[in-house]
Image: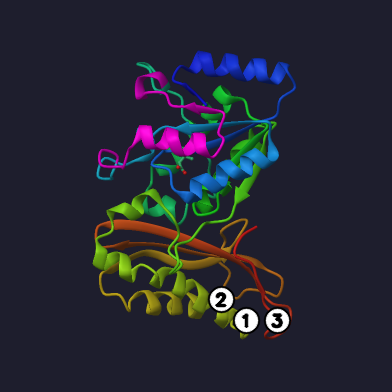
Amino acid sequence: MKVVKSIKEMQNISDLLRADNKKIAVVPTMGYLHNGHISLIEKANELADIVITTLFVNPTQFAPNEDFNKYPRDFDRDCELASNANSDYIFAPNTLEMYPIGHSTIVLVSKVTEKFEGTFRPSHFQGVSTIVTKLFNITKPHFAIFGQKDYQQTLVVRRIIEDLNMDIDLVIAATLRENDGLAMSSRNVYLQESERKKAGIIFRAIEEVKRLIAKGETNRKILNSNLHKILREVVEIKIDYASIALADSLEEPEYFLSGDKAVILIACYLGKTRLIDNSIIIFPNKLNESNFIESF
Ligand code: PAF
């Protein structure tokens, strides 16, 4: 596995690979890799000849009060894990390489960025869409692999690819979970032991609301209030949002209809750690005939 730090070198490598008819898949990450990331690299290897894993803790997607400085970093361990997972390249630029003096272009996606994460982290998606566009221009992939855990981010990336006519196949890979259902995340290391024991409540809230849907509940407010009720069983939890919405548009109808594809979205603090999770469900056609899908 080769580590590349310069944009020009990465672009040259990708140009040569493309000239050689190789299919390239990119796995954008902020490092501190865990099994969730490894599963993305594995997916990339299934689809493409060459896998580029990017490691860059992108400052522009963190607000000043957020955890950019303490975001976990371990470059050597990341390289070892990515290499073991058969990533062919790591692209790991420094901040000045990605944002040189004078950098002043941003990529702004509207609509799908406005709710949920957009409400609580107003500048976040602007940072994400800008860096993702830059990473696509640098690595020149045929496939881009993202995890479903950052569900709203996947909608944003889909818009970028479609709206800017990028010739890239977006592939969304299922969320990997710990035994108690906690979605794998680099930020899970922030959880204290006592908090970690309670974190499974997020997945339990999602599963219980899915059961309500299977029993025929379609009223959004009732479903949301059940999510909140279950999460509040853990007093240390502070909810940013816990809501169900239409999966493609994030619109929130009063009632869901049979066949609607919806997404249950949760963001909450457990102590000082912000956790997010989601799950997709199709509203059943008949009572008790729910189509439980965790992922795409
Ligand atoms: O999902 C992430 O880790 C980041 O938001 C991404 C896509 C690598 C952009 O910095």
Disc 1 secondary structure class: helix
The magenta stretch spans residue 268: no
| Residue to which mark 1 is pinned | 214
Return the residue nearer the eye: 146 or 33.
33
Whether residue 218 is visible, yes or no, is: no
Q: Is residue 27 above or below residue 287?
A: above
Amino acid carrying mark 2 in the image: Lys
Residue occupied by mark 3 = 289
Mark 3 neighbour class, 10 Å CA radius: few under 14, some 14 to 19, many 20 or more:
some
Magenta span of residues: 68-97
Residue name at image x 66 percent, y 15 percent: 16
Give the spatial CA distance, label 1 vs label 3. 6 Å
Which image quadrant for residue 196? bottom left
| Left or right of residue 41, residue 179 in this image | left
Instruction: Give whichever of discs 1 and 3 has the lower sequence position.
Output: 1
Labels 1 and 3 touching (C-beta < 8 A): yes
Q: Nearer the viewer, residue 55 or 224?
A: 55
Residue shown at the point (45%, 79%) measured from the top left: 226
- Distance from disc 2 to disc 3, alpha carbons, whole Å, reads 12 Å
The disc, 2 or 3, on the residue closer to the chain's N-terminal end is 2
Q: Residue at x 49, y 51 (%)?
A: 150
**Which quarter of the rendered picture does the C terminus lie within?**
bottom right
Can residue 275 be seen here? The reply is yes
State the image quarter where residue 247 is shown.
bottom right
Image location (x, y in percent) of residue 12:
58, 14
Q: Does the numbered disc 3 mark a residue whose Cβ is under 8 Å from ligand 1? A: no
Question: Residue 69, position in %: x, y?
Answer: 25, 38
**C-beta proximity under 8 Å, tags 1 and 2:** yes
Q: Position of residue 129 (x, y in %)?
A: 50, 37
Numbered mark located on residue 184 in the image: none
Q: Secondary structure at mark 2?
A: helix
Badge 2 is on which residue?
A: 210
